[in-house]
Amino acid sequence: MRWFGYKLHLIVDAVYELPVHFSLTPAHVADITEAHRMIDHLEESRPEMLEHAETLAADKAYDDTKLIRRLWDDHQIKPVIDIRNSWKDGEPTRSFTKWENVVYTYKGKSIVSAR
């Protein structure tokens, strides 16, 4: 959440709907940078929270290979994170090279058109 040039970052226990950790940063600090800091903090101060966590849900600002691998490889936490559209050309779909009538979106959904 942004408010007057600041962002509030929260890790919340979804079962009890209680904050586990929070931080307040200037708005220019990248969400993914703060996510790694918050995981570092939990590893040091509350490792049991990471041991019992099954999933971590976040928006696409947290779509980062390093974070995803860290969550799974180090803590067996399943990341539930929407993927970013990193296509620079602005096109909504792209064609498969083998078939002219099949296209796909940046999320990997394929669409077949009848020709």
Image (cartoon, helix red, strand yellow):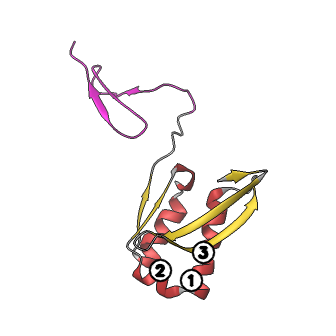
Q: Residue 26 location in percent, x, y?
A: 78, 58
Residue on which disc 1 sits: 43
Of mark 3 and mark 1, the one earlier in the sequence is: 3
Task: Give the magenta range.
Answer: 88-115
- From this viewpoint, which residue is outermost toward the top? 115
Residue at the (61%, 69%) spot, across then down: 36
Q: Are marks 2 and 1 in contact (CB under 8 Å)?
A: yes
- Quadrant placement of the C terminus: top left
Residue on which disc 3 sits: 21
Q: How many marks?
A: 3
Q: Is residue 26 above or below residue 50?
A: above
Q: Residues within 10 Å of mark 2 (few under 14, many from 20)?
A: some
Which of the labelled discs sits on residue 6, or is there none?
none
The residue type indicated by label 1 comes to: Glu
Q: Secondary structure at mark 3?
A: strand
In which quarter of the view is residue 14 placed? bottom left
Q: Secondary structure at mark 2?
A: helix
Question: Is 107 in front, or is 103?
Answer: 107
The residue type indicated by label 2 comes to: Leu
Q: Main secondary structure of the magenta part?
A: loop
Residue on which disc 2 sits: 50
Q: Residue 27 location in percent, x, y?
A: 75, 53
Q: Residues within 10 Å of mark 1 (few under 14, many from 20)?
A: some
